[in-house]
Amino acid sequence: MNLIAAVLLFLGLSLASFYIFPSGQPQPADFLLLGFAIIMSIMALGDEHLELSPFVVSWGMMVLWVLFVCLGWTLVMETTAFLMYPAFFFFNFLVGMATLRFLRIFGSYARVLIRTAVSIALLVTAGYVMVQLAMGVNRTTGSFNNPNQLAYFSLCGVVVLMMLDDFRPQLKPLVLSGLAAGMVGILAASSLAAMGGGVLVVAGWAMANATRIKHFARLLVAVPLLLVVVIVINLRADGQVMHNLQSRMDRAPTKVESMYEERKFDRLVHFPEYAILGAGEGERQRFVPYHRNEIHSSYINMLFAYGIPGLGLFLVVIFTALRRAPAYVWVGLAGPLFYSVTHNGLRSTLFWLVLVLCWHLYRWGRQSVHHPLPAAQDGLVPGEPSTRH
């Protein structure tokens, strides 16, 4: 069973960047990850000791609140249109709990598996990007359905690889290739928010490596290598990457001015009463003429759709995952969090994996990255209750 779970997790993460169905529908990787979650859940039934961590409790309460709001609106409006949305939250919660248990049981082996799988996923979508750039595509989508999905996945993937090595990435071909592929995805998508998030990730990387000469030397070696890769790709694409970036930068002032309407923040302003307990994420015709498209912000969407309790619990989950992490991890993780200000990334499994890894690796501070401690504190995992104070 453990081997089957490991294979499903590896394949699920490796194919996570491969979309063949319309956005909002399950993709091939989702079925693999669901199988992984089911197997790990069944195995957890035999655990002698189960203990809930603050991270699991806050995340679980958030999912329950989302379900409560959606069930309430289902009854009020007599439609099942609201029920699709808590399914995303519940799916990511199951996968997150299964991943925590897998990390606890297999330790460094699990981290190697995740590192390898995420690197492969980034390389897969970078391969698509190269083909699209060669064809002269203006804003590439990689193996996704739109550029924003490419940018967000690449940004979260880079953070995952960074955290697995405590923001001191190994100078190994697969790791460096994965990081380079992630940077290519961010740049090729020409997303200003993703590039801003990428700058924060690089800042966290620099902070982590500036304290020791050995690590700083690695930084001096790795940065030029990554830059060379990006330059080569740009040249092979006849300068398309830089052309796309320049076009997006030229449009930046206009995008900032139109952000209020374009990102649907005006829906919250015109219907502020829904921010108390939440409006759910269905039946948007209630908000005519501000009903078109979803709110493009994880935070404002949580506030409008699930009210002050929903947003509060979401922020608690983030804070709990980060609370004992070093400063450079806060800065690095600020990358995808910054991106989420103007994009709704709540359905992305890789985003929740970032938080899962942050909690698992840094729950006792930096030392737990290389020396995991015993551990019912991981969540629903086996083991004697921790006696550490």
Image (spheres, grey):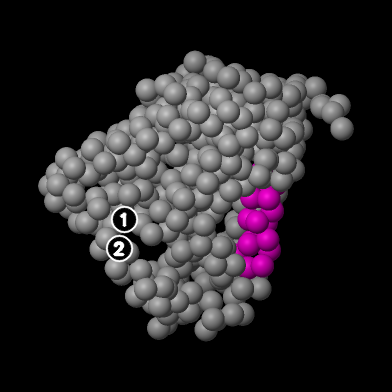
Q: Position of residue 138 (x, y in %)?
A: 20, 56
Figure quadrant of residue 230: top left
- In this view, the residue in front, 259 or 299, is 259
Q: How crowded is mark 2: few (under 14 residues within 10 Å), some or many (20 or more)?
A: some
Quadrant placement of the C terminus: top right
Q: Please tell me the numbered disc located at residue 290.
A: none
> Three-letter amino acid code at disc 2?
Arg
- In this view, the residue in front, 321 or 82, is 321
Q: Do we see residue 166 in this rendering? A: yes
Taking the image as shown, residue 215 lies to the left or right of residue 152, namely right
In the image, what residue occupies the spot 49% across and 15% down?
3
The magenta stretch is 305-321
Task: Give the mark, 2 or 1, whose residue is nearer the N terminus.
Answer: 1
Mark 1 and mark 2 in contact (Cβ < 8 Å)? yes
Between marks 2 and 1, how big is the CA–CA gap? 6 Å
In the image, what residue occupies the spot 29% across and 36% down?
229
Q: Please tell me the numbered disc located at residue 190.
A: 1
Q: Residues within 10 Å of mark 1 (few under 14, many from 20)?
A: many
Q: Do we see residue 80 in this rendering? A: no
Q: Position of residue 161 (x, y in %)?
A: 48, 33
Taking the image as shown, residue 378 lies to the left or right of residue 300, namely right
- In this view, the residue in front, 311 or 166, is 166
In the image, what residue occupies the spot 63% across and 62% down?
311
- Residue annotated with mark 2: 248
In the image, what residue occupies the spot 55% across and 44% down?
204
- In this view, the residue in front, 93 or 145, is 145
> Three-letter amino acid code at disc 1?
Ser
Q: Where is residue 123 in the image (x, y as percent from the top left)?
A: 32, 33
Q: Position of residue 124 (x, y in %)?
A: 30, 34
Q: Say if 287 sits above or below 203 in the image.
A: below
Q: What element carries label 1?
A: loop
User: In the current view of this chain or complex, which residue is farthest to the left?
Assistant: 135
